[in-house]
Image (tube, rainbow, N blue to C red):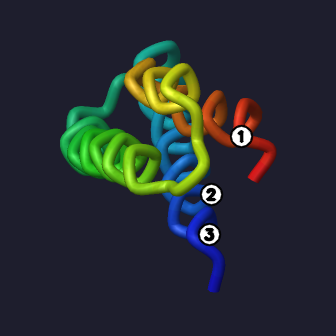
Amino acid sequence: MTMARPLRFAAAVEALSLLVLLLNLATVHIDAVASLTGPIHGCAYLFVIIAAFRLPGLTRAGRLRSLVPGIGGLLVLRAGST
């Protein structure tokens, strides 16, 4: 297992959960969906930050990209080509 594998998974969860939250907000806005997806998105966001800062060989700019809410994980993966 590579060091970037958890980051890839967390970035995918972060992006997918953001998509679900935005679709829910734009359409029917079911409170239960927001209550379930919101914490998942928040945990994925925090995990992306931690995983990015622990990834060896990633530049400072790459690590700072992880702080961008919603798409930070994807930006880190793109910057680091991991």
Q: Is residue 18 left or right of residue 46?
A: right
Tell me the quarter of the image containing the N terminus. Answer: bottom right
Q: Is residue 82 left or right of residue 17?
A: right
Q: Percent from the top left, x then y, of residue 9?
A: 57, 62
The relative height of residue 73 versus residue 7 in the rendered view (above or below) is above
Q: CA distance from mark 3 to mark 2?
A: 5 Å
Report the residue at 51% width, 19% height from top.
27
Report the residue at 57% width, 29% height from top.
62
Pick whichever of labels 3 and 1 is earlier in the sequence: 3
Q: CA distance from mark 2 to mark 1?
A: 11 Å
Q: Percent from the top left, x then y, of residue 68?
A: 44, 18
Query: Which quadrant holds residue 61?
Result: top right
Mark linked to residue 8 = 2
Q: Amino acid at mark 3?
A: Arg
Residue that label 1 marks: 80
Label 1 neighbour load within 10 Å: few <14, some 14-19, many 20+: some
Residue that label 3 marks: 5
Q: Amino acid at mark 1?
A: Gly
Q: Percent from the top left, x then y, of residue 7?
A: 54, 57
Q: Percent from the top left, x then y, of residue 22?
A: 49, 22
Q: Report if residue 28 is visible in the image.
A: no
* Circle 3/circle 2 CB separation < 8 Å: yes
* Circle 3/circle 1 CB separation < 8 Å: no
Pick whichever of labels 2 and 1 is earlier in the sequence: 2
- The residue at the far right in this view is 81
Q: Secondary structure at mark 1?
A: helix
Label 3 neighbour load within 10 Å: few <14, some 14-19, many 20+: few
